[in-house]
Amino acid sequence: MLTILKKYNLTLVLFPILLFLLGVITIHSITPERTNNQLLFFSIGAAIYIILASIDYTVLKYYWWVPYISVVGLLILTFIIGKAVGGSVRWITIGPMALQASEFAKVALVISTSAIISKVAKKAQVTIKNAVYTIVISMPMVVLIITQPDLGTTLALIFILVGLLYFAGLNRKIFILGSLLIILAANPLWNSLHDYQKNRILVFLNPQLDTKGAGYNVVQSIIAVGSGGLSGQGFGRGTQSHLQFLPAYWTDFIFASYAEEWGFIGVVLLILLCIGLHFSLLFMAANIKDTFGVLLIIGAFLMFFIQFVINVGMNIGLMPVTGIPLPFVSYGGSSLIASCMLLGIAQSVWVYRNV
């Protein structure tokens, strides 16, 4: 174990821990009763991280179907015994814990897509046939999640899938064709959305359309971020979160809660840590020769990057509200453990890169 620890890429340990510390400090400030739970979730995630980092990642190339089938099974189980919250059925209650299978779908998608592409692609070039096969394999997870409904996670999965196909060398002409198909599908896709999802998009374009309804979250979030000023209101002094004007202030809108208490300086620190994590993953990918290993790390990068962009964007009114957490910062066991799992796999790629 010590030999493996010495081979660690320390940036993949440092950045997640620092982000978690910023998150748990904010959680302790705005909702202290949840602090112990978050520490427990991180302990579980850290243990899984260490275990996965010690196992040769190439095993996943041949057993990718294990996490894939497990997640699909959990998603199906969610429809059967899942708990409905806010009109969506996303959680399975296990004792005092609530499991969100869609968070683990991100990990399963990265593993399965990377394994399939690395097996069928020649010289990292993906053909149309390979791409279609990969998409078909991924569809059960995407369809099950969008019917929960969970538009945010669905978009994140599609982004990861398309990103992996692009990095694997799929012809750009195919992307252009795909973009045209998406444009053609825009109208039927819009018609398939629930009314509240349509409202979120319309309010995203103009929050003032419904400041007390669909636009309330965005308006309150922007107020919280703006009230932070340069150095913030201080620990435990954020009025938007403490007076509960800001909804989901410990999960989806924790960035706004953090910005209100720590201000512009704190926001810059958080963003730099996120960028540091992203660049660490890109650096690792650039120094790995194995196609499967590269795709796993790129998949991890895409997952963290898209969640960062969506979460921060919706907190400052630049993206629609979709319920995407900020990795390592937002409260929640499923998101935190899934993030640790993916980084543990990425660390394994680095540790076993020369084996």
Image (cartoon, helix red, strand yellow):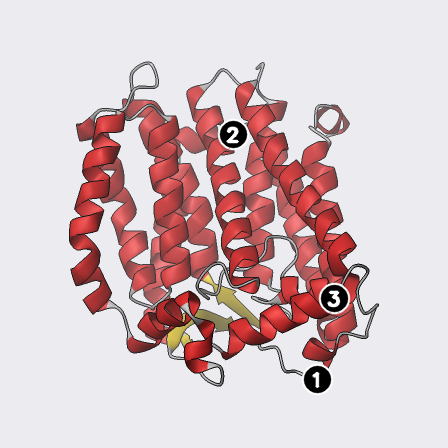
Q: Which mark is residue 57?
A: 2
Number of other residues with Cα within 10 Å of mark 1, as a class: few under 14, some 14 to 19, many 20 or more: few
> Residue 3, how many percent across, how many down?
74, 23
Residue 214 is at least partly visible in this image: no
Number of other residues with Cα within 10 Å of mark 3, as a class: few under 14, some 14 to 19, many 20 or more: many
Q: Nearer the viewer, mark 1 or mark 2?
A: 1
Q: Are marks 1 and 2 in contact (CB under 8 Å)?
A: no
User: Is 69 rendered above or below residue 89?
Assistant: above
Q: Which mark is residue 76?
A: none
User: Type of residue at label 3?
Assistant: Gly
> Residue 125, how many percent across, how many down?
30, 19
Q: Quadrant of the N terminus?
A: top right
User: Type of residue at label 2?
Assistant: Tyr
Which badge, 1 or 3, is on the more N-terminal residue?
3
Residues at marks 1 and 3, CA–CA distance in whole angstroms? 15 Å
User: Is 123 rendered above or below residue 146?
Assistant: above
Does residue 150 appear to the left or right of 266 in the view shown? Answer: left
Q: Quadrant of the C terminus?
A: top right
Label 3 sits on a secondary structure element that is loop
Judging by the rendered image, the residue that carries numbered circle 3 is 228
Judging by the rendered image, the residue that carries numbered circle 1 is 243
